[in-house]
Image (cartoon, rainbow, N blue to C red):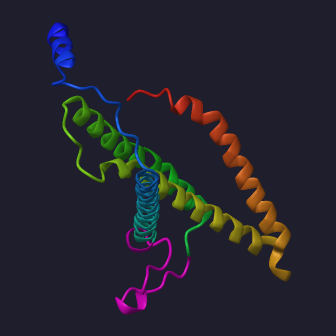
Amino acid sequence: RTAAKEALLESGKLSISAPAQPSCGDRLRYRAAASVKRAANDVGGLLVGSLIFVVSRVWSDALKGFILRFSSPWFYDDIDLPAVQHPATSHQWLLLVLCLVPVGGLFKHLAEDYIERAQRAGRKPVRGVELVPTVMNYIVGWNAAYGALAFLVEQREAGCRTTGCVGLNVTHTLVWTGAAAVFIAFVKPYALEIEW
């Protein structure tokens, strides 16, 4: 092949020219197209994140309002359900969270296992299944937050009924944030190594 190419080059029937450099306008168009694609990906990510937030909140509220009756559900006066007279205590919320952790973990595991099996088989997993683990995390998190709020309300009723209790609110927020940070620092390394 090389000898044939050399013969064609010598005869003038074949010429080698350097590839044309893109013009300034072409480079600007490529950059603009890449920027638009990145922006579309960012907006899509924002919308998916918002959807995860909404779905997890709706399920959490349905669980606490309609199923467990821990608090009054949405529009309870329109659907002939009586208002909840005694909202759930922080102890009840704690029990709920302790029950939700294994259930949410199971759904999370099933979704992740399905994705792995589909990829090993060379198939594309069903769209949206990759969002299940995050939704499960949020549902557990929302209910833990409701429990923390119930605990704060109980503390306010026990000894702080005047002037809005700003100190108690700030202390409550700082303690929960610190406790979450310590918990994550200790649990996260072990959670990454768990094989089901």
Tell which residue pokes out farthest to the top in this image: 3
The residue that appears at 77% across and 57% down in the rendered structure is 174
Q: Nearer the viewer, residue 184 or 85?
A: 184
Q: Quadrant of the N terminus?
A: top left
The residue that appears at 51% across and 31% down in the rendered structure is 192
Q: Magenta stretch: dominant SS? A: loop
Tell which residue pokes out farthest to the front in this image: 11
Specify start and end residues of the magenta stretch as a single range. Answer: 65-86
164 left or right of 194?
Answer: right
The residue that appears at 51% across and 54% down in the rendered structure is 97
Is 173 colored magenta in this rendering? Answer: no
The residue that appears at 55% across and 29% down in the rendered structure is 190
Q: Up-down: is 14 above or below 146?
A: above
Q: Up-down: is 157 above or below 48?
A: below
Is 85 colored magenta in this rendering? Answer: yes
Asked which quadrant contains residue 91, the reply is: bottom right
Residue 176 placement (x, y as % from top left): 71, 54
Asked which quadrant contains residue 106, the reply is: top left
Q: Quadrant of the C terminus?
A: top left
Residue 119 placement (x, y as % from top left): 25, 34
24 left or right of 13?
Answer: right
Q: Nearer the viewer, residue 160 or 50?
A: 50
Asked which quadrant contains residue 33, the reply is: bottom left
